[in-house]
């Protein structure tokens, strides 16, 4: 299959220029003049052609949660986000008993083997259960605990596609966890944490390389031990060793804090994530976050809230909304695309495959107009829409 995208402006890192994109046999063959006779021609109609978006923190969408732990749920949730531009995704689990996490990871494996996935899964993410009780957020405190080497070693060894784990670095044994994950190529991310900035700086020397959903479920400046100290948020903004993922839905993080993050981290270290829940794209009502046996209910109105409260849960904004939101607050289009493509690819160490429009890279691309509205999606060398 040869696809040629014509009449568009390709987003090539920091540069945007008019060029045709040729995809052949599932990979990018050329950026510039079209090469060969196309089986399919996609007219970008003067819009922008970007690498496929990469969502490294997503729980579900289209009414399905990845922790339902079935091939059908993986297919449905991933296809919802694929239509919104996320050609590469990292399905994410919330804190739960080990048996539920194993079912989630087994379902990931089964979905990959099924041949039914149109989207590209680039690893699994365990958000917990090694999180702070003080910053539990939408995680059930009943399942939070200190890092257990017998447990996390088992998971990493059994599931080589386990790509990310979010943990609170102030917990006993967290530095050893960070060291172990880093040594095994797993992104250790600081999140749901009440740590001081000093602890965060130390964690960055023990394998932690990112921060999960900046500003949300984390400590900030305040009194500690009788003196004013920074928290996770301030440390994340200051420490160049750390990537920071941010939910750019303008609900979890307001405009001024998004601008602060962009100014401090830059496009190279700021990653846009959806943190989407199953009700993304659905009507108002009550939905499930996590597994049926160990999850919680969320109410969806103008946003998703922990059931019966006004406390935000994850978001209902997919990747294309994140792009439009960043553009709406004055972030240059090329930088907004970078934070959805190259930055997450570099964090996960998959930038030799996805995240850039260049010959030899995966045949994934998103076409959108000047408003950020997606017109076409190409994934795995196939036109999805």
Image: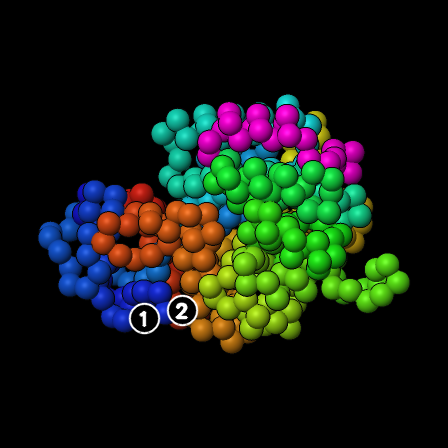
**Residue 46 visible in the shown view:** no
Q: Position of residue 278 (x, y in %)?
A: 59, 42
Is 205 magenta? The answer is no
Q: Is residue 330 left or right of residue 146?
A: left
Measured in 3D between alpha carbons, the distance from the residue under mark 1 to the one under mark 2, in whole angstroms, is 7 Å
**What range of the chain is rendered magenta?**
139-161
* Residue at mark 2: 334
Q: Is residue 355 left or right of residue 127?
A: left
Q: Are marks 1 and 2 in contact (CB under 8 Å)?
A: yes
Looking at the picture, does residue 298 appear above or below residue 357? Answer: above
Q: Secondary structure at mark 2?
A: helix
Q: Which mark is residue 149?
A: none
**Residue 329 visible in the shown view:** yes
Q: Is residue 305 left or right of residue 74?
A: right
Depth check: give the residue in front, 129 or 223. Answer: 223
Q: How is the image coloured?
A: rainbow
Depth check: give the residue in front, 14 or 190. Answer: 190
Quarter residue 296 falls in: top right
Is 147 magenta? The answer is yes
Depth check: give the residue in front, 171 or 306. Answer: 171
Q: Secondary structure at mark 1?
A: strand
Neighbourhood count class around disc 2 (C-alpha, 10 Å): few under 14, some 14–19, many 20 upward = some
Residue at the far right in the pictured view: 226
Quarter residue 357 falls in: bottom left
Residue at image point 64% right, 73% down: 256
Looking at the picture, does residue 28 appear above or below residue 49? Answer: above
Q: Position of residue 284 (x, y in %)?
A: 66, 49
Q: Quadrant of the N terminus?
A: top left
* Residue at mark 1: 16
Q: Position of residue 250 (x, y in %)?
A: 62, 64
Quarter residue 332 falls in: bottom left
Disc nearer the start of the sequence (1/2): 1
């Amino acid at each position: 299959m040869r696809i040629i995208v014509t009449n568009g402006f390709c987003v090539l890192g920091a540069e945007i220029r008019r060029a045709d994109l040729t995809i052949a046999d599932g990979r990018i063959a050329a950026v510039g003049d079209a090469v060969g006779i196309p089986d399919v021609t996609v007219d970008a109609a003067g819009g922008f052609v970007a690498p496929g978006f990469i969502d490294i923190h997503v729980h579900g969408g289209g009414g399905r949660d990845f922790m339902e732990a079935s091939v059908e749920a993986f297919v449905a949730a991933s296809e919802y986000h694929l239509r919104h531009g996320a050609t590469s995704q990292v399905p994410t689990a919330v804190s739960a008993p080990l048996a539920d996490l194993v079912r989630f990871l087994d379902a990931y494996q089964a979905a990959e083997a099924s041949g039914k996935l149109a989207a590209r899964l680039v690893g699994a993410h365990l958000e917990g259960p090694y999180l702070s009780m003080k910053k539990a957020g939408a995680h059930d405190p009943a399942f939070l605990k200190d890092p257990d080497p017998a447990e996390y070693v088992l998971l990493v060894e059994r599931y080589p596609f386990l790509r990310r784990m979010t943990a609170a670095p102030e917990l006993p044994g967290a530095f050893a966890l960070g060291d172990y994950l880093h040594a095994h190529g797993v992104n250790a991310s600081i999140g749901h944490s009440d740590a001081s900035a000093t602890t965060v700086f130390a964690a960055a020397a023990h394998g932690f390389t990112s921060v999960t959903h900046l500003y949300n479920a984390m400590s900030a400046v305040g009194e500690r031990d009788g003196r004013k100290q920074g928290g996770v948020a301030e440390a994340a903004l200051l420490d160049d060793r750390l990537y920071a993922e941010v939910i750019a839905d303008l609900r979890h993080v307001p405009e001024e804090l998004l601008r602060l993050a962009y100014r401090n981290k830059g496009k190279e270290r700021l990653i846009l994530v959806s943190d989407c829940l199953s009700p993304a794209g659905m009507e108002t009502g009550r939905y499930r976050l996590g597994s049926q046996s160990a999850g919680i209910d969320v109410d969806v109105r103008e946003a998703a809230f922990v059931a019966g409260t006004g406390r935000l849960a994850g978001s209902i904004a997919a990747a294309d909304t994140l792009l439009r939101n960043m553009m709406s607050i004055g972030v240059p289009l090329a930088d907004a695309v970078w934070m959805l493509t190259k930055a997450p690819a570099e964090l996960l160490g998959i930038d030799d495959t996805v995240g850039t429009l260049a010959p030899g890279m995966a045949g994934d691309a998103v076409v959108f107009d000047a408003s950020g509205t997606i017109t076409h999606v190409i994934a795995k060398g196939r036109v999805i829409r």
